[in-house]
Image (cartoon, helix red, strand yellow):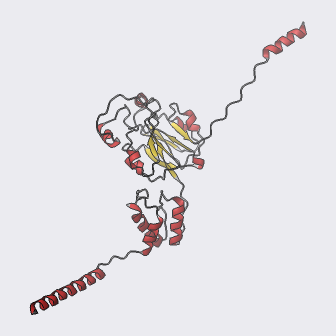
Amino acid sequence: MNFILIAVIVLGAIGLIAALVLYLCSKKFAVYEDPRISKVNALLPGANCGGCGFPGCGGMADALVKGADAGSLDGLFCPVGGQDVMGQVADLLGMAIANGEPKVAVVRCHGTCELRPKIAQYAGLRTCAAMHACGAGETACGFGCLGCGDCVEACQFDSIHINPETGLPEVDEDKCTACGACTKACPRNIIELRKKGPKGRRVFVSCVNKDKGAVSMKACKVSCIGCGKCEKECPFGAISVENNYSYIDPDKCRLCRKCEKVCPTHAIVAVNFPAPKPKPEAPESTGASSNDQKKEENA
């Protein structure tokens, strides 16, 4: 019986010492978490898409709290939650936040199946990343959309789909949150986040082909040939030509659409503009009847 009592006492003492050690360790190595982080995290949408540049909403919440302590939230924005969520976060942290202009994903390739015909048959893994790693793909353009839908798989908001007729991805502006997942998934970097623009109107060059004009035109009929006509025509200095293709700076563009009219290959695309008004029909010529009338008067 004494042995049992001794064993109980020894085990109790060991448990007490272990508890004391764990308590001291918990105090010594405790990690303090600002209670505001959990509150900010609760306001964020919880998509964990990484569009903010941080590893999930938890990382974004931590950055927002640190930014508030530093006195500025500049550069911190949740594309999924948008301005409404950021306004709630700013109110919680007692900070002011600048209004961020909404953005949308834009596919900078206009080479449909008809305009960019296939010259090869790909039989490998049906992903854009795999096809791009193998070469130019099924067309002669080594810069255009591959059409396998990696961007579709990456989108968590069902805002991008492949059009079966054109073979190109199309973005639903109402669903797109500009999280940037599709831009990261595209191995050829043809998807760009651009400002939505007033009334959703945008003008951009729908081509990223870096080949010289003659080569790019053989691969795609609507390829940018880097002729520079749009650059010369733009009165605002919004267009630059580098690596044999043009780029329109959305911060400088004033949507005058002069560049679109002078583009010889129609590589410049204008979105959400109203259809041009039909020109009034010219009045029928009355020259013949007036001459006949004069002849009758002379007779």
The reply, left or right, for residue 134 in relation to residue 103 is left
Q: Quadrant of the C terminus?
A: top right
Q: Is 259 drawn above or below residue 18 in the view shown?
A: above
Q: Nearer the viewer, residue 258 or 174?
A: 174
Q: Nearer the viewer, residue 292 or 62?
A: 62
Percent position of residue 292, x then y: 83, 11
For the point 45% across and 51% down, the residue is 157
* Number of marks: 0
Q: Is 159 drawn above or below residue 50 in the view shown?
A: above
Q: Residue furthest front?
A: 1
Percent position of residue 259, x then y: 56, 37
For the point 51% across and 63% down, the residue is 86
The quarter holding residue 278 reads top right
For the point 55% across and 48% down, the residue is 252
Q: Is 10 drawn above or below residue 137 in the view shown?
A: below
Percent position of residue 104, x then y: 50, 49
Q: Quadrant of the N terminus?
A: bottom left
Q: Residue furthest bottom?
A: 2
The quarter holding residue 179 reads bottom left
Percent position of residue 228, x then y: 50, 36
Q: Nearer the viewer, residue 101 or 208?
A: 101
The reply, left or right, for residue 17 in relation to residue 188 is left
Q: Nearer the viewer, residue 107 or 150?
A: 150
For the point 68% across and 30% down, the residue is 279
